[in-house]
Amino acid sequence: METTRTLGRSGIGVSALGFGCWAIGGEWQGADGQPLGWGKVDDEESVRAIHRALDLGVTFFDTADCYGAGHSETVLGRALGTRRDDVVLATKWGNLFDPDTRTADGQDDTPEYVRRALTASLRRLGTDHVDLYQFHLADADPGRAAEVRDVCEELVTEGLIRGYAWSTDDPDRAAVFAEGAHCTAVQHTLNVLQDAPGLLELCERADLGSVNRGPLAMGLLAGRRQGPLEAGDIRSRPPVWLQGFGDGSGADPRWTARVDALRDVLTSGGRTLAQGALAWIWARSPRTVPIPGFRSVAQAEQNAGALEKGPLTAGQLAEIDRILGR
């Protein structure tokens, strides 16, 4: 398969697979103690995993200022070091946090905050520009979003960002950002269990890239089963928006049953389950760039290995739809 893709009308080329850097931020929590990370992390292993991803052809890394209350950006910037210009770097803004207590601390959707947040991200990432800057408040007011979109256009003119996107699962909200000349993509949920036809149609119509979070359904499509999760893992006390996990009991059996039904198709051609899930996304649209998370060199190698196997066939896509009854 073609191992590179273009982020919409921007002309920015990326590897067809990106790496999501939420998990490597480590533990952090909401004001109520709700875990917002994926549990403990080894920073040295994170750095090794990023280096391995680079060696295997991954050139797109997606993070957010709030992941680990700033820690993910710091680790990513350190790992990239002198190879910064070899990659396309994406981060997000809108969520407030206290880095000392590693606690989420509200939200700020004001136009004035955009520049302050970007300045802090540039410092943590150790760079002078971000390639893709993404609004992280999925349900923000569309009118306010239009104002922050205009600020993003100013940041493009100043050379501080190359393009921008909204991280939202609402096509109508994403369309507000799409009106901006340098809107480059939409970041949204997409996996074989959670299709997003409305957003993919918008990306096609508006010539945007589709950056796909949750491509492995928070681990379910990497083989995550029933059983306890560590206390600092968001899946151990899943918030309302996190589907597929029972409160404290691990994976929801209704979801794992669907994964099991798809296993033979997804593991065709010598793929692992996770590689098959990524192959479905690439087959779903030529605009897609999935960004699975990772915490180890082994996970980096497995995810990057999907590039060699390529997308599923049209027949396999149809078979999956038949199995899922859609």
Image: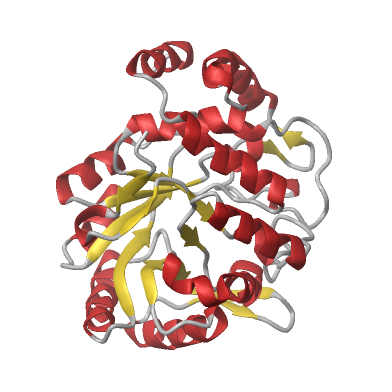
Q: Quadrant of the N terminus?
A: top left
Q: Is residue 236 above or below residue 43?
A: above
Which residue occupies 40% across, 45% down? 16
Whether residue 100 is visible here, answered yes or no, is: yes
The percent coordinates of residue 83 (x first, y second) are 51, 71
Which residue occupies 62% across, 54% down? 52
**Front residue of 281 and 239:** 281
Which residue occupies 42% across, 72% down? 85
Q: Is residue 124 above or below residue 201?
A: below
Q: Quadrant of the C terminus?
A: top left
**Front residue of 92 and 54:** 54
* Left or right of residue 318, residue 221 in this image: right
Q: Quadrant of residue 190?
A: top left
The percent coordinates of residue 20 (x first, y second) are 54, 55
**Front residue of 247 and 189:** 189
Whether residue 170 is visible here, answered yes or no, is: no
The percent coordinates of residue 291 (x first, y second) are 49, 49
* Left or right of residue 262, residue 299 in this image: right
Which residue occupies 36% across, 14% down? 318
